[in-house]
């Protein structure tokens, strides 16, 4: 049983309730969270819910049918664990990588530098190694921990390392940001109790022959005192011998159903074979995992442990690229440090203010979460409000859609980019899938009215043509349409929005994925007051007007071609107040400070009337 407490409950009131529960023969654990505090009650319950609810501190009583209480999804805990500035379990997909073991200062630092350049934010490496043979390399111990700390110091990466015994927990926690409990220790209950006592996230690997229930019971040992637990599927022992273990990817969706805890996958130990790591990593992302733990080594063939399953740097780079292109398909964003360096340095206490247009559950909100991770984006009614809030400094960033792969450009935002003096500092691509939503009990044949954002309506054109009798109303936002039918308690109306919006407003999904084509992506730009150019920015956006004379645009294109700058987007917009004259938006590949792009910008004024750089940022 989980008792949710009033958030303003005093320690005295909680202690009173606890002693009442103890008098009734139960064991209790108080979990005080930022957003909710609860008492987890274990043992036979010999009192009624009514008796319990008569205590004024009790807000709600949740009866959990699973043997694991706090790990259970029913407990209502937030499904996210914070690692640095990243919320694991949200739209971010986190890759942790590094050598199996810390072998030497040289190898570890080289690995850390290379991974950091690639954008990996968490470095792994074992200092204490659980080896099958006592004759194998056992790890450098505390010396290894010191090297990990040095690598963190130099690169700013977070470090994760294994702790094998309860008496070493404090030592390891002194050096590491994240503790790993290895497969062989999943049921070392003394160790589980010990890691519960430190303020560090814990990666709990699945035991070599553990069932999912046993694994969750292991997590339960930690969760009473430390709620930052991440589960890691790393393969189990089966009769199959072609791979080191059998990577049980079934476990990912099963766990997602049973628990709120984030789930990551270790395809290195799961396969034991380097060339299987990429396909199984992509499969993990597809299965719904929240991240990966990957072994990498500068020279895998000479690694002191697990070389056969360790990737080279080039192989990891290829894997990151593949994950980056797959991420939008599953509605996620690969966490890469260089994509938003400003976030990596902003401290948790001064949370970054991010605005988007729409209501909670809108695709723009998902994009903001995907880009920034640990923020609470604020919705505003219209696109100009996003620009106003950023221009006035009220919000640090805004996130707005700029183009959709089916319906084309969102022209209003192109115009607003010109009107306001702001800079594009990043972009996010998201797969957009639309659904027909209606209040509970409403059936498709009851529908007479349909509410949807014009973009959503355009993307579902084929589906709508099947319902010519519906009256279609354009709205300001996808999630806002759902909010509207919900508030009106409409029994003859439906809305088009995301599954996330269906969850937030608790409505029925009458038809899923009704967009014309599943290859439906929206590109969002992140805007800020100041430009933020750094060496990983590889895309530059400009807007310009040309004189109204023959060959004017051709002259511009020729300049760009002569300087070998790759044009990746060209869009024309009417100039307000000058009928039949146009301005042009362009995206180029390349950093604004690169020789080619800066040369183009140097000569472009010769053949344009006005020219404005909208931003230089890392492409999604
Ligand atoms: C490791 O990650 O280095 C390790 C020893 O993993 P596992 O506990 O999954 O075997
Ligand atoms: Mn290993």
Image (cartoon, helix red, strand yellow):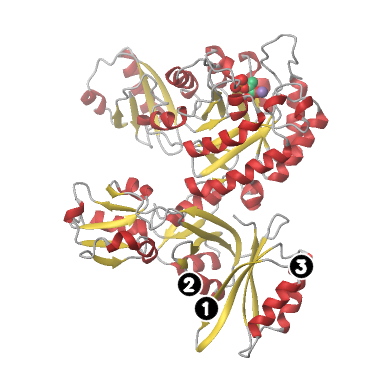
The tag earlier along the polypeptide, 3 or 1, is 1
Image quarter hosting the C terminus: bottom right
- Residue depth check, mark 3 versus mark 2: number of the one nearer the observer: 3
What distance separates the C-alpha of mark 3 from that of mark 2? 29 Å
Check disc 3 and report its element: helix, strand or loop: helix
Tell me the quarter of the picture where residue 163 sits.
top right
Q: Position of residue 181 (x, y in %)?
A: 59, 21
Q: Give the image quadrant in which the ligand numbered 2 is located.
A: top right
Of the residues under marks 2 and 1, which one precedes in the sequence?
Answer: 2
Residue shown at 32% from the left, 12% from the top: 25
Q: Residue furthest right?
A: 106
Q: Pinpoint residue 194: horizontal percent, then vertical percent.
A: 56, 17
In the structure shown, which secondary structural element does the residue marked by tag 2 occupy?
helix
Q: Residue at x 52, y 71 (%)?
A: 414
Residue at the spot 74% in from the left edge and 25% down from the top edge: 102
Task: Give the residue at mark 3.
Answer: 596
| Vertical relation: 282 (above or below) 461 | above
| Rendered position, 291 above or below 326 | above
């Amino acid at each position: 049983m989980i008792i949710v407490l009033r958030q303003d409950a005093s320690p005295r009131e909680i202690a009173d309730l606890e002693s009442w529960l103890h008098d009734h023969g139960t064991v209790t654990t108080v979990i005080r969270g930022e957003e909710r505090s609860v008492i987890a009650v274990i043992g036979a319950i010999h009192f009624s819910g009514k008796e319990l609810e008569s205590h004024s501190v009790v807000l709600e009583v949740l009866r959990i049918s699973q043997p694991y209480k706090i790990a259970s999804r029913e407990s209502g805990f937030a499904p996210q664990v914070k690692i640095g500035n990243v919320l694991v379990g949200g739209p971010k997909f986190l890759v942790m990588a590094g050598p199996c073991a810390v072998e030497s200062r040289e190898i570890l630092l080289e690995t850390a530098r290379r991974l950091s350049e690639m954008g990996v934010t968490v470095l792994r490496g074992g200092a204490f190694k659980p080896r099958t043979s006592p004759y194998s390399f056992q790890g450098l111990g505390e010396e290894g921990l010191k090297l990990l700390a040095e690598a963190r110091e130099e690169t700013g990466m977070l470090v994760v390392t294994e702790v094998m015994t309860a008496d070493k927990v404090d030592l390891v926690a002194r050096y590491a940001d994240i503790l790993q409990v290895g497969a062989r220790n999943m049921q070392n209950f003394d160790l589980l109790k010990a890691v519960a006592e430190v303020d560090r996230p814990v990666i709990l690997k699945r035991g070599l022959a553990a069932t999912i229930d046993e694994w969750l019971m292991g997590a339960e040992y930690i969760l009473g005192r430390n709620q930052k637990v991440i589960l890691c599927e790393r393969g189990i022992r089966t009769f199959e011998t072609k791979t080191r273990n059998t990577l049980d990817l079934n476990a990912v969706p099963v766990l997602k159903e049973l628990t709120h805890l984030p789930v990551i996958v270790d395809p290195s130990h799961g396969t034991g074979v380097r060339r299987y790591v990429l396909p199984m990593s992509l499969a993990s992302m597809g299965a719904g995992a929240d991240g990966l733990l990957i072994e990498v080594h500068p020279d895998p063939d000479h690694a002191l442990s697990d070389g056969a399953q360790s990737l080279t740097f080039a192989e990891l780079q290829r894997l990151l690229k593949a994950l980056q292109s797959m991420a939008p398909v599953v509605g996620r964003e690969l966490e890469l440090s260089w994509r938003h360096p400003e976030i990596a340095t902003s401290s948790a206490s001064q949370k970054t203010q991010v605005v988007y247009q729409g209501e909670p559950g809108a695709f723009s909100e998902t994009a903001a979460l995907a880009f920034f991770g640990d923020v609470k984006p604020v919705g505003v009614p219209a696109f100009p409000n996003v620009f106003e809030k950023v221009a006035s400094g009220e919000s640090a960033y805004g996130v707005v859609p700029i183009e959709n792969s089916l319906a084309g450009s969102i022209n209003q935002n192109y115009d607003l980019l010109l009107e306001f003096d702001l800079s594009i500092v990043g972009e996010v691509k998201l797969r957009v899938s639309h659904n027909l939503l209606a209040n509970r009990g409403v059936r498709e044949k009851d529908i007479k009215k349909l509410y949807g954002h014009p973009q959503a309506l355009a993307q579902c054109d084929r589906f709508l043509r099947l319902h010519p009798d519906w009256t279609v109303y354009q709205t300001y936002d996808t999630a806002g349409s759902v909010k509207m039918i919900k508030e009106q308690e409409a029994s003859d109306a439906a809305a088009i929005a995301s599954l996330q919006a269906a969850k937030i407003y608790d409505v029925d999904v009458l038809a899923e994925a009704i967009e014309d084509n599943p290859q439906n992506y929206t590109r969002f730009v992140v805007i800020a007051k100041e430009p933020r150019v750094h060496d990983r920015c590889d895309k530059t956006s400009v807007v310009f007007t040309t004189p109204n004379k023959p060959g004017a645009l051709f002259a511009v294109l020729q300049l760009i071609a002569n300087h070998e700058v790759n044009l990746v987007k060209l869009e024309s917009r009417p100039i307000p107040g000058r009928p039949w004259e146009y301005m042009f938006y362009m995206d180029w590949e390349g950093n604004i400070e690169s020789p080619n792009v800066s040369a183009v910008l140097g000569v472009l004024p010769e053949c344009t009337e006005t020219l404005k750089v909208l931003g230089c940022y890392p492409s999604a």
